[in-house]
Image (cartoon, helix red, strand yellow):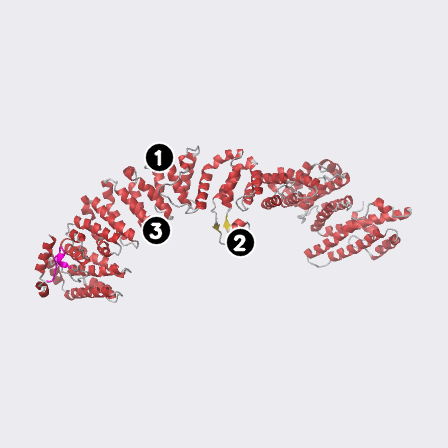
Amino acid sequence: MTSKIQKTSKNLGYSKDKVTGLQCLRSSVKWHRLEHIATSLWDVYSGLFGDQAMILAVNSSFVDPSLQFESQLKIIESSFKKVFSIPSLEKVRQMGNSEDDKEDIENLYQNILNMYEDTLLILVSKDLYKLQILKDMAMWMNEDSSYLQERAIVVISRVLSFASRKVRGYASVDAPCLGVLAAELSLLCCHNDVSITQQASLGMHHLLCIAKCQNEDIEKTKSTKYEKHGNHCLLSPSSVQEFVPKVLQRDRAKIAQSVGQTLMPSLLTDFVWSLLMTLSSPNCVTAFKASTILKLTLEYHAHKVTMVSKIVDAIYKKLRENSSHAMRQAMLRVTTLLTRTSPKKVIFQLMDYPVPADDTLILMWHAAGSESSVAPHVLKTILLILKGKPGEVHASLPERRRFSLDTTNMMPVAASQALCTLLPVGSYKKAVAQFFPQLLMALMLQVFYISELRLVTEDRPLTLSEYNFPQFPETLQYLYKLSVEGPRRSEDTVITVIFFTELLNNFFKDPFPEEFLVLFRNWVNDSNPAVSKLSLQKIANMAPVINEIENVCSLLISILDAFLSKEKTVIIRALLTLRRLLGKLDKVTYSSLCIRIASSYCPLMDHSNEGIRSMAIRHFGELLRDMSHYTWMLNDVVLGGLVPLILFLEDTDISVVKACRHTLTICTSELNWSTSSLLKDKYYNFELVVLNICNNLLVSHENYITDLISDTLGFLRSSRIYLRKASVILIGYLAKSGGHLLLRDEIEVMLEAIDRVLWDEDPIIRQLAEITHKIFKEIAHRLTSSHVKQTFRRLFHFIYIKKLKPLYNYNWPNNLASSPMKIKETDGDKEGLTDENYVYMFVKNET
């Protein structure tokens, strides 16, 4: 049997690729007489002839392939409307007056159809991509039932038959239209007209043979079977006629099975998408057929479908446009079937719509939730989304995938609402137990984010921890794991600590077991200040049982580390917590840490925050009082903290001043100094206190004077005026009392520091600095290069202690006579008060 192209070419005078002028002329002359008998038929023939010439001319040109195809498709469509609008053969034959006329008319009629078919065969023979035309033909045919559907489907089937033979042995096949064409043919396989059904089924068979060559996985596993025959079709040609009526004709389940097994994922997705769009067809019969085939396909092959999100989005939009859609249940069933194999994709897409969810979205949630087999996967996906933070801004995105990811993330809110829909479902009630701790914490975090909760120390509302829910052990274990590993966000730790603490409070008595307590110890120095304060608050509550804690020292040290925090509220909370614990701590442990604790207070005495300064100073004094029996251990620390205690007597904040007086009173008492009365005097004078302390230092702790001068020099650079004033005065008295201890190099450094203060912006500081500068100059002048003389001088000062006299007269009381010091100007003062008289007056007044 000659090929169809050869047969047609013979009838019309064509070669395989083109028509010779002579043959064309003969055909035209033969039927020219029909021009007056069957005018409409002759017009179609002549028009089709011209169309074919244009199509073949474009096919042989060097035009861009995409533009070439577009122009050819337009001509093909025009030809299609001409060819398949012709009346049936019976009606056309009636145009003839004689049997010869009728035979010629029939031949012309047949050649018109053959010419159209030949054109398609020529195009496909050169480029299989142009099978796309068949897909458009099927769509044109279904759009208008007036076309000769049976003849159109015959042409489609024959072209597919030719293409299926052509692709034998091809390494690859470029025919992306097969999915959509398969969808159109599957509907025609269920047509009421048996002749259309048979041709559509035959065409579907050939299409699946072509698709088989595209599916590399199936080709690898079955290539050996078909290589013997040199045939890559699913079935041998001899069995086609037997196979088609039994398998593909009107058997929707078999159609769905064959298509699902054969089409590769991208083509099967096109198949599903095309049928989904057909559900909106005004033809209810066609829509019903499409829904049946679609559901049967997804029942067994949904796992091969890609672009799940696009399909779900299309369903949502169609149902939202028409809530009473005739195919609503079918669309919801599609959602269910897609959820079965791609729960994550479906869930993420359903989260992508505005909140709160509308009725359409709730319907789709119910559809997704009706698939019980994937309930754990759905919950796991929702849990993943709940880990996000609502309103979180994404700075930049490479492409726009979801509106929720475009600017702010509201998917966690949608996930929370989805849980409200899903949790009442029976299958989800069982599955939720598996993820209860994670879901519980995720929802609590969402409440925290959305409500913008703040730390509340008192009258906090009830929490879930007070209910004895069955999953308590699992929840506690999960929280412990989460606490050890650390949450994704710093702020997440806040709610974790709150809930974890509540659970522990209900399950354990203080103190917590060490494995839990270590978490609170670590949280003390968390980067999130709120977490640090929560942990410190809980530790403070353990004060009554502080001595029962195994590693109490490490706990206290972690609190000391919190003194270094940049957040002032954390430091304050740490100071309060430590003071509360020390009040209950046994003295043996206390004494082992007292030096380290005291040393940790000292840097805070110069803190920029007055509240922290006053608290650190006062607590330093309380520690000295607690450790009154261990004064010998703390002497170095006390003297090391003496400079800020003295200088901040001049603080502008009254709470700091009171704290300094309180602590200095304790210090001087422990050191047996006679300074307490000066600190309590209502006519208190800073210079007299400094004078008294320096005289006491000279008597009992002379060796510390050089270090105290060095400590004071650092305050000369302070931005606070009162500190610079106080520092200048203190340095002067320290230098006056311990000048004999200073070396030349030390004096030069101190003079350089004082020189800078001589240019201070404050005039009072400049005046005070001049006096101090003069003192250092005198000390430098008395220095001798003789080592023997220097040693003798120091020995003389050790034997004969010369107490100091006032040097600055800084802020003296107006009525000195009423002061207990009773220092007033006398004739002796004018003439010059002797050292002996001054010492006698000083001692007498203090006693």
Q: Nearer the viewer, residue 254 or 614?
A: 614
Q: Is residue 608 above or below residue 487?
A: below
Q: Looking at the picture, does residue 202 appear above or below residue 19?
A: above
| Element on which disc 2 rests | loop
Q: Is residue 70 visible?
A: yes
Spatial CA span between label 3 and label 1? 31 Å
Query: In terms of image quadrants, where is residue 363?
Result: top right
Residue bearing mark 2: 398
Query: What segment is highlighted magenta in the picture?
Result: 815-825
Seen from the viewer's position, the closer of residues 783 and 5 is 783
The secondary element bearing badge 3 is classed as loop
**Mark sitting on residue 508:** 1
Q: Main secondary structure of the magenta part?
A: loop
Image position of 317 (left or right of 191): left
- Above or below for 789 versus 479: below
Please name whichever residue, 353 or 727, is drawn nearer the observer in this view of the structure: 353
- Label 3 sits on residue: 567
Q: Nearer the viewer, mark 2 or mark 1?
A: 1
Name the amino acid, label 3.
Answer: Glu
